[in-house]
Image (tube, helix red, strand yellow):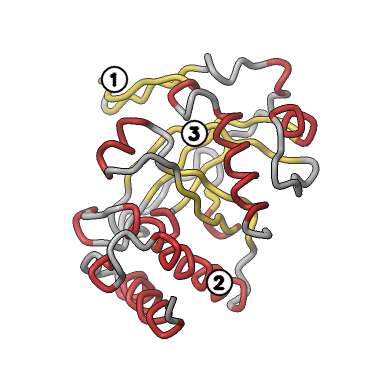
Amino acid sequence: MSPDLVTKVADVLDEATRTGIPCAPVRALLPEGDIETAYAVQRLHVERGVAAGRRPVGRKIGLTSPAVQRQLGVGQPDFGALFADMAVAEGEPVAAGRLLQPKVEAEVALVLAADLPHRDPTVADLLRATAFALPALEIVDSRIAGWDITIVDTVADNASSGLFVLGGTPVPLDRVDLRGVRMTLDKNGETVSQGTGADCLGSPLTAARWLAATLAGLGV
């Protein structure tokens, strides 16, 4: 892994953010399929954000749908970092042009009350550590022109993160079936997408356990 290459790719993505002009796929700058270096680019992005005064508040999990995994030719999810300045209040409009190429996804958010430091957390550990769940929207974005991405592109690009909206009504986990919770997305009165919590790696808890184990394995 070349530090100079990591810096070069991070600079390209930062320039796209600064100018509002999407860049060419960054996979062309990296060894083919090199997810490890792509995550190094993401870590540099987070370090730069913290140095600039941004506050990390959580993580997002991407590629949790089998359909999306097939689309990108992968068999695993990915993750990115969430900062406080990415949060949008419930009901607050998002100005056109704030993001480059926004798309919206419905999500389940878990708000933790305790850390999950173990390398092999169980679902029981996760249940004990979670304060409550919230309905959420993720407004994904890509610095890559035309969303022409592979897993290497999206990982380097902070898992195509943009903004997120948290619902304002916390729900304890013993009062909701996260697998069965339903989502319907309407556009101009027409249903354009629908699904359940089970579409997220079988359960949002399974996805969150994967994230906790992956981060702990990385020493985070």
Circle 1: residue type: Thr
At x 64% / y 16%, what residue is drawn?
176
Left or right of 57, for residue 14: left
Q: Nearer the viewer, residue 90 or 151?
A: 151
Looking at the image, is 166 positioned above or below residue 194? below
- Cβ atoms at labels 3 and 2 below 8 Å apart: no
Looking at the image, is 85 positioned above or below residue 116? below
Which mark is first along the chain, 2 or 1?
2
Q: Residue furthest bottom?
A: 4
Q: Nearer the viewer, residue 197 or 190?
A: 197
Circle 3: residue type: Glu
Residue bearing mark 2: 49
Residue bearing mark 1: 191
Q: Position of residue 114 (x, y in %)?
A: 80, 43
Q: Secondary structure at mark 1?
A: strand
Circle 2: residue type: Gly
